[in-house]
Image (spheres, helix red, strand yellow):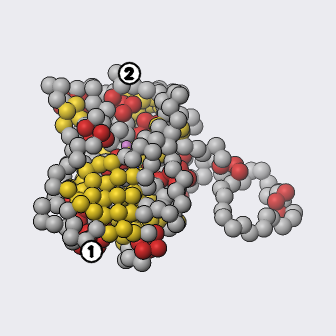
Amino acid sequence: MTQFKDNDSDLQQVAGNGLLHRRLFLGRGAAMLGGLGLFSASASAQQGPLQIPQWMLEPGAHMSGYGQRSQYEEGVQRIVGGAPGVSGSGVSFTPLQNLHGTITPNSLHFERHHSGVPNINPEEHRLLIHGLVSRPLVFSMDDLMRYPTVTRIQFLECSGNSFNNMLPEAQQAPVGVLHGLMSCSEWTGVPLSILMDEAGVEPEGDWVLAEGADAAAMSRSIPMEKIMDDAIIALYQNGERLRPENGYPMRLFLPGWEGNMAVKWLRRLKVNRDPTMTRDETSHYTDVLLDGRARMFTYPMAVKSVITSPSTGLNLNSGPGIYEITGLAWSGAGRIRRVEVSADGGASWAEAAISGPALDKSFTRFRMAWRWNGGPATLKSRAIDETGAVQPTRDELVSIHGERSNYHNNSIQTWHVAENSGEVSNVYA
Ligand SMILES: Nc1nc2c(c(=O)[nH]1)N[C@H]1C(S)=C(S)[C@@H](COP(=O)(O)O)O[C@H]1N2
Ligand SMILES: [Mo]
């Protein structure tokens, strides 16, 4: 937890329970805090001259062919889940509590596999486009690498993300376990519209079956409109080739749509008249409604945000003072227009500062300065996207879906800060 020394009585409170104006995180605002000495709470120069540390007494390690993080950071790990006794099927969560900024390092991208990670030799891998096309095509990796590519920074979120918060009792787990089935990367790949145009889609070809080369042969039906709009065959993730666990050597990437449709290890695209009704779009990834029926084909991930710090385990243990509240906001419908934060359980809200340009269908980092007075506090964030859609409360979502729906939970996360101890817990409120 970042804490600033609170010695400025002019910091303007803009909403209940100590929320301060977002200008403290805009432009030269932070420099103003620095000038007031607010950052230097623990950096006093009392200890005398700097010592010469061990690592200055001899040359350091040689260059290396492939970089590794510091040994002191090895504790930052994906949190690996999965059903007992089932090999290869399950999830691993991105440790959002350890990450800042908006890009997820490839090694920490969340994982969801239905039958493990295949070890694919790219020389032998082929992508077939067939069905209602005038010219079926088969691509080797080399063939595909000759096509033009596009590069975009976009999130990927499993529609099962935040399922923990649909359980009857609020779980006390790190924010990564509660919301870490999502990540954000720079994806580079070939626009699928180019390949489809080359194959020549028949007029009645309204759907595309996408199939993976894993043992699950996981497959989904994608509307042709999305395929021709912004779908890509992703080859690179944050500048390097995809990791095996994220679909090497190629995956389908559908900006803003539920993660399940981003078929990894892509081997086949079949153009059809209708959706195929595969196992993954009928038995799973449907939304149970109050009357017991299930809604299929909920594609875009709705507007959402979460405060990543403070959060469970990231307690306010330096006592009362000024803290940074920070988190992520994103929407499958486009850009984030605004993020609001509340410290009094939703009674009042203040606008957070947004870092950098809010990119389309991408993680957007928000920050808010907060003066914690040591009393109890209830923190929430609420995102609004460029379509005007507002993130719902858990109660609002439950009134539509009941509590039996595991998917598409975009409701507001609430953190409770305990009086005095500053311990943070997950609550439903
Ligand atoms: N072939 C194949 N594609 C797949 C899956 C899979 O198990 N097999 N899992 C899907 C699910 S449910 C999600 S949420 C995303 C996860 O992508 P990631 O593991 O790269 O995070 O991939 C999707 N694509
Ligand atoms: Mo998923």
Q: Which residue is depicted at the point 16% across and 51% down?
A: 274
Image point (39%, 52%), residue name: 212
Residue drawn at 46 percent across, 37 percent down: 90
Q: Secondary structure at mark 1?
A: helix
Q: Amino acid at mark 1?
A: Glu
N-terminal of the pair, mark 2 or mark 1, is 2
Disc 2 is placed on an element classified as: loop
Q: Is residue 332 left or right of residue 39?
A: left
Horizontal side of 357 relative to 123 (left or right) equals left
| Most distant residue in the right direction | 57
- The image position of residue 233, as x and y in percent, is 37, 64
Q: Looking at this view, is 273 or 108 the one in front?
A: 273
Residue 209 locus on image (x, y percent):
27, 53
Q: Is residue 198 left or right of residue 151?
A: left
The answer to whether residue 229 is above or below residue 111 is below
Q: Name the quadrant containing residue 378.
A: top left
Based on the displayed image, in which of its 4 quarters is residue 267 positioned?
bottom left
Residue behind label 1 places its C-beta within 8 angstroms of ligand 1: no
Q: How many marks?
A: 2
Residue ID for mark 2: 169
For residue 297, above or below residue 86: below
For marks 2 and 1, give the CA distance: 53 Å
Residues packed near mark 1 inside 10 Å, few (<14), some (14 to 19) or many (20 plus)? some
Say the numbered circle drawn on residue 198: 1
x, y percent for residue 215: 45, 45
Report the front residue among 23 and 68: 68
Amino acid at pointer 2: Glu
